[in-house]
Amino acid sequence: MCEPENGHLELSDKGKLEGMECLARHEKLTQFFQMVSGMDQQRAQEDACRVEHYISPEGLKGIENFLQYGDVYDRVYDDMDLYTFYEDGEFPMAFGLYEPERRNPRFLAPEYGKLEHSVILRVKKSQNCFLLRTKKDESIGYVWYRRDDEWIQAKEEKGVYQLPTDICTYTANTGIPITEAVAIIAITRFDQKPLPIDYRELNIHVW
């Protein structure tokens, strides 16, 4: 801000630029709140005033993408709480189990043929998990999942392995009504920490 000879305060070039950015941020937030909640313009502007001073550049960029493209671009989530999308219950979902080092084309892991060709999403308020199930009279050994760079052996009961849902990375795209959940797990013949040769890519289609 500068003060010319006439005594009136005027914005510097830097101040004008920052003011324009602030106004653009305010307008985008106002439009966003109107679109997602149906609130009137005054209420949307009030909420925009509260948020614009605290929102991160990443958060604002996501809102800009929403306003420009609508809710059709891919978004990636970690630690998604599926309880917010499902009621308590069990839901069958298609999946694939792949050898992660072999792509273009992808190859199904040998254990896939011993598994039921759907996983069960079990939703409870206290704990959500995917149930990986072997076919009758089949066995695949020990299943492991990774958390904080540590391999943890999955709980198993009668050929059903429990995999926590928060080990997955989720990709959502509302243009196609499907969410992909991906995790690197491991399968070993013996009760020993996995080696890279034991790694498998679990890919679940969460409808």
Image (spheres, rainbow, N blue to C red):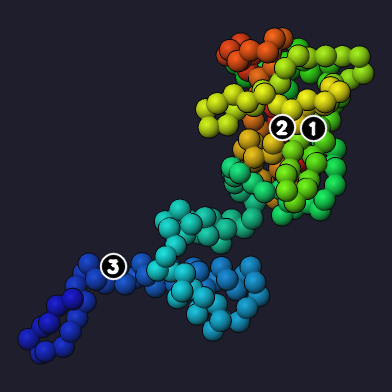
In the image as oriented, which residue stretches furthest toward the right?
136
> Which residue does the image show at 50% across and 79% down from the upper left?
45
The amino acid sitting under disc 1 is Leu
In space, the residues marked 3 and 1 are separated at their CA atoms by 54 Å
Residue under label 2: 163
Q: Residue 170's quadrant in the figure? A: top right
Q: Residues within 10 Å of mark 1 (few under 14, many from 20)?
A: many
Q: Is residue 200 visible?
A: no
Q: Which residue is mark 1?
A: 131
Residue positioned 55% across, 26% down in the render? 150
User: Counting residues from the N terminus, which is met first, the one under dot 3 or under dot 2?
Assistant: 3
Task: Name the foreground residue: 37 vs 124.
Answer: 124
Position of residue 124 measured from the top left corner of the image (x, y, whole percent)? 78, 48
Quadrant assignment for the N terminus: bottom left
In space, the residues marked 3 and 2 are separated at their CA atoms by 51 Å
User: Of label 3 and label 1, which has the lower sequence position?
Assistant: 3
Q: Answer with left or right where residue 44 lies relative to residue 113.
A: left
Point out the frontmost of discs 3 and 1.
1
Work out whether residue 116 or residue 108 is closer to the camera in this orientation and state it.
116
Comparing marks 3 and 2, which lies closer to the viewer?
Answer: 2
Give the amino acid at mark 2.
Leu
Q: Is residue 134 left or right of residue 127?
A: right
Q: Is 114 above or below relative to 19?
A: above
Task: Classify 172 as above or below 138.
Answer: below
Q: Amino acid at mark 3?
A: Leu
Number of marks: 3
Q: Identify the residue under disc 3.
A: 17
Q: Residue at x 84, y 42 (%)?
A: 91
The percent position of residue 50, horizontal first and vertical second, equals: 46, 74
Asked if disc 1 and disc 2 are in contact, CB closer than 8 Å, the reply is yes
Mark positioned earlier in the residue sequence (1 or 2): 1
Q: CA distance from mark 1 to mark 2?
A: 6 Å
